Amino acid sequence: MSANFDLKGRVALVTGASSGFGEHFVRVLAAAGAQVVAGARREDRLHRLVAEVGPERALAVAMDVTDAASVAAAFAAAEARFGTVDVLVNNAGVAAPGMVHKASEADWDWVVDTNLKGAWLVAAEAARRLLAAGKGGAIVNIASVLGMATSRGHGIYSATKAGVIQLTKHMALELAGKGIRVNAICPGYFKTEMNDAYFDSAAGQQYIAATPGGRLGRMDEIDGPLLLLASDAGSFINGALLPVDGGHLVMSI
Ligand SMILES: NC(=O)c1ccc[n+]([C@@H]2O[C@H](COP(=O)([O-])OP(=O)(O)OC[C@H]3O[C@@H](n4cnc5c(N)ncnc54)[C@H](OP(=O)(O)O)[C@@H]3O)[C@@H](O)[C@H]2O)c1
């Protein structure tokens, strides 16, 4: 096998690392050899994660992705400790379920600021620092199947994830000549703090049973896709959208 999934010598930054996918991604990237910066607002959780992964290979940074100054400070802290971030997993996200016409302006601002503005602020900061350092890198945006499909009650979230997908393609286009690859994973449903109450309910279980795979994803089923896009194994993959959804998007209508 010639594919190289090894991340030794790489510096990864994961946003939304205090729970769910982000926490998992920190463990996966560290196990693949990277030094990993774990960013989110709940610092106590980040410190616990870093203690588990090993303080020599991980760093906790307080980071609010909606705030440009906080994003810049997190990258500066990462750079001071490990060097230029060359693998970014742009993962922080929130959801405020509800019909589009009933949503409040506050819900719109919260979801759009976190999922879309936040993804842009973080990816742009990573790109500027890589360009300044003359280095290549990999940006992996965590979009969603809802960036490609619809689901009643998830319109605003879905619009932000469609925005992340377009952001991914444009950044891939603009940075391709600089050795910076920008791709997106579009997860289907995995149980995390964002949705566990729903998937533990009878309605949630019925919903999942009706999907083609008939089950939620297991966390380890996103490891391969993440490492493919983050490592040299994916060195010619740029601007790609990778659904990891057990076939949910190809559901028969
Ligand atoms: N689970 C799924 O089925 C699924 C499916 C498709 C896509 N996704 C996407 O996967 C990503 C991770 O979600 P998850 O399922 O793992 O949910 P989660 O467990 O609720 O994690 C969300 C993370 O985002 C962070 N976050 C929220 N607002 C933030 C902010 N302003 N600044 C920094 N961090 C912030 C949270 O940390 P703090 O609160 O500590 O800041 C938390 O670590 C999201 O982008 C989500 O849209 C999830």
Image (cartoon, helix red, strand yellow):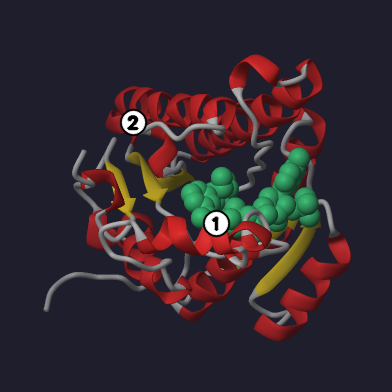
Task: Say left or right for 47 vs 38.
Answer: right
Q: Nearer the viewer, residue 93 or 189?
A: 189
**Three-letter amino acid code of the residue under disc 1:** Ala
State the SS at label 1. helix
State the SS at label 2. helix
Relative to 199, residue 152 above or below: above
Q: Is mark 1 within 8 Å of ligand 1?
A: no
Indicate the position of residue 47 as horizontal and vertical percent values: 82, 72
What residue would you read off at disc 2?
Answer: 172
Task: Say left or right for 237 vs 44.
Answer: left
Indicate the position of residue 104 as horizontal and vertical percent values: 77, 19
Which quadrant of the rendered structure holds the N terminus? Answer: bottom left
Indicate the position of residue 237 as horizontal and vertical percent values: 22, 46
Which mark is in front, 2 or 1? 1
Residue at 47% over, 43% down:
141
Indicate the position of residue 21 as horizontal and vertical percent values: 56, 62
- Asked whether disc 2 touches disc 1, contact meaning CB atoms under 8 Å apart, the reply is no
Give the farthest residue toward the right.
Answer: 44
What residue would you read off at disc 1?
Answer: 203
**Three-letter amino acid code of the residue under disc 2:** Ala
Q: Nearer the viewer, residue 248 or 13?
A: 248
Q: Give the class, few, some or many, for how many residues have Cα within 10 Å of label 1's Cα (few <14, many ≥20).
A: few
Residue at 67% over, 72% down:
58
Task: Say left or right for 166 vs 133.
Answer: left
Q: Is mark 2 within 8 Å of ligand 1?
A: no
Residue 201 visible here:
yes
Distance between mark 2 and mark 1 Cα atoms:
39 Å
In the picture, residue 211 is in which quadrant?
Answer: bottom left
Residue at 50% over, 64% down:
205
Task: Say left or right for 226 vs 233.
Answer: right
